[in-house]
Amino acid sequence: MTQDDFGHFFLGDFGNNENKRKWLTIYKIENPIDIKGETTSAEIIKFMYPEQISYPPKENQKKYDLKAFVFYKKKLYLLTNNRTVPFDGETNLYRIGAYAANHQAKKLSASSTCTHHEKLCWITLAALSPNKKKLVLLDSQRLGLFENWQDDDFCSGDAYEIDLGTITQKESVTFYDDNTVVYTDEEFMGIGRNAYLIKLDEQKKIPVR
């Protein structure tokens, strides 16, 4: 889920674990404060990846799962979740329009910020800071932090890895302010089901390129 500058919500139906889906969907709804009554209609945004030519592709080309996206400068930006075998850790950045249509997702760039272990590197969510100068990607153990990018290519600037100190199923992340990130995890075998707050300027940032 992400939100634009007018408070519209975008809800992603684009999970693609096996890379078998061709057309993916995002639903756009009004700002809740503008909804009159108990129901509303959603705009339907469809998209596909032009680079994918088979469904599913070969194991070493399974780069079309998706969990993380953000709204930025009137567009939607998709950061894919890698399921390649062998795992190469590459995350692709795509751009589509934020309006109802059938879109061909435009690939902008790619980044490999985590190659330690397949399941621990799967990206679950992304968030932009309020000032739109920081992007974070969440996985089971780390935050990927991107800054100082060029134009709308988040992967073109500085990239860092922040170890969060625990290995849990982390499933949500947002910025409280430009320096404060809040994330949550699910409970497994008595560990997790918490919300966490960290200050970015107090973290050890490991450059990844």
Image (cartoon, rainbow, N blue to C red):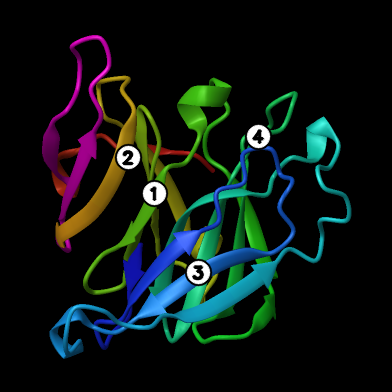
* Residue at the outermost top position: 189
Closer mark to the observer between disc 3 and disc 1: 3
Relative to the observer, which residue lies in front, 45 or 194? 45
Badge 3 amino acid: Ile
Q: Distance between the Cα atoms at labels 3 and 1?
A: 15 Å
Residue 145 seen in the current view: no
Q: Position of residue 12 (x, y in %)?
A: 46, 61
**Label 1 near label 3: C-beta < 8 Å?**
no
Which of the two discs, 1 and 4, labels the residue nearer the N terminus?
Answer: 4
Range shown magenta: 177-199
Residue 71 figure quarter: bottom left
Closer mark to the observer between disc 3 and disc 2: 3
Residue 143 figure quarter: top left
Which of the two discs, 3 and 1, labels the residue nearer the N terminus?
Answer: 3
Badge 2 amino acid: Glu
Which of the two discs, 1 and 2, labels the residue nearer the N terminus?
Answer: 1
Circle 1 residue: 125
Badge 4 amino acid: Arg
Circle 3 residue: 26
**Label 4 near label 2: C-beta < 8 Å?**
no
Q: Distance between the Cα atoms at labels 3 and 2?
A: 19 Å
Circle 4 residue: 83
Q: Distance between the Cα atoms at labels 1 and 2?
A: 7 Å
Circle 2 residue: 171
Number of other residues with Cα within 10 Å of mark 4, as a class: few under 14, some 14 to 19, many 20 or more: many
Q: Position of residue 30 (x, y in %)?
A: 29, 84
Residue plotted at (57% across, 24% down): 118
Badge 1 amino acid: Leu
Q: Distance between the Cα atoms at labels 4 and 3?
A: 21 Å
